[in-house]
Image (spheres, grey):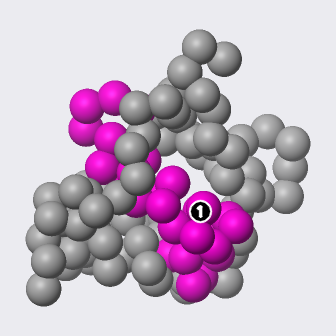
């Protein structure tokens, strides 16, 4: 099984993205993932699955969990330690859907 770092090497570049905004039913983002150290891997994973699936729903969340590789068990064992993985669990468990907006740098 590929590691998280191996998976990241296969994902599209995110250099041009300032952040991803996740929208539920409302007009304000319910969450955002910034392009900064500590969250760049999550941003890359979320961006990849959002592009592939047209947003973030249960199917996209399952794909994302596969990309997080070894971090998934740690997130399962330690709720709150990996909030972006916790969100994926919630999307699957509650059958949620988020629209995802990539905000370019300089916008």
- Image quadrant holding the N terminus, namely bottom left
Tell me what residue is drawn at x 55 percent, y 76 percent.
60
Q: In which quarter of the image is residue 98?
A: bottom right
Quick check: 94 above or below 39? below
Quick check: 94 above or below 99? below
Nearer to the camera, 52 or 65: 52
Quick check: 11 above or below 19? below
- Image quadrant holding the C terminus, namely top right
Relative image position of residue 61 (x, y in whole percent): 50, 75
Magenta-tinted stretch: 35-61
- Secondary structure predominantly adopted by residues drawn in magenta: helix
Nearer to the camera, 98 or 75: 98
Nearer to the camera, 33 or 50: 50
Quick check: 16 above or below 85? above
Relative image position of residue 37 (x, y in whole percent): 26, 31
Q: Quadrant of residue 11?
A: bottom left
In this view of the protein, can residue 74 be seen by the observer? no
Relative image position of residue 9 (x, y in whole percent): 22, 57
Query: Is residue 40 a member of the stretch shown in magenta?
Result: yes
Q: Is residue 90 left or right of residue 86?
A: right
Residue holding disc 1: 50
Tell me what residue is drawn at x 41 percent, y 53 percent.
12
Q: Is residue 2 left or right of residue 75?
A: left
> Quick one: which residue is furthest to the top in this view?
106
| Badge 1 density bin: few <14, some 14–19, many ≥20, Cα 10 Å | many
- For label 1, the SS is helix
Nearer to the camera, 35 or 25: 35
């Amino acid at each position: 099984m590929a590691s998280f770092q191996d998976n990241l090497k296969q994902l599209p570049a995110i250099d041009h993205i300032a952040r991803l905004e996740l929208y539920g039913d409302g007009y304000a983002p319910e969450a955002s993932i910034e392009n900064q150290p500590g969250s760049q891997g999550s941003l890359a994973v979320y961006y990849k699955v959002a592009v592939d699936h047209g947003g973030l729903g249960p199917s996209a969340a399952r794909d994302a969990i596969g990309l997080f590789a070894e971090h998934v068990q740690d997130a399962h064992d330690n709720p709150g330690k990996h909030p972006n993985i916790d969100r994926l669990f919630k999307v699957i468990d509650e059958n949620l859907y988020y629209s995802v907006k990539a905000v370019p740098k300089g916008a």
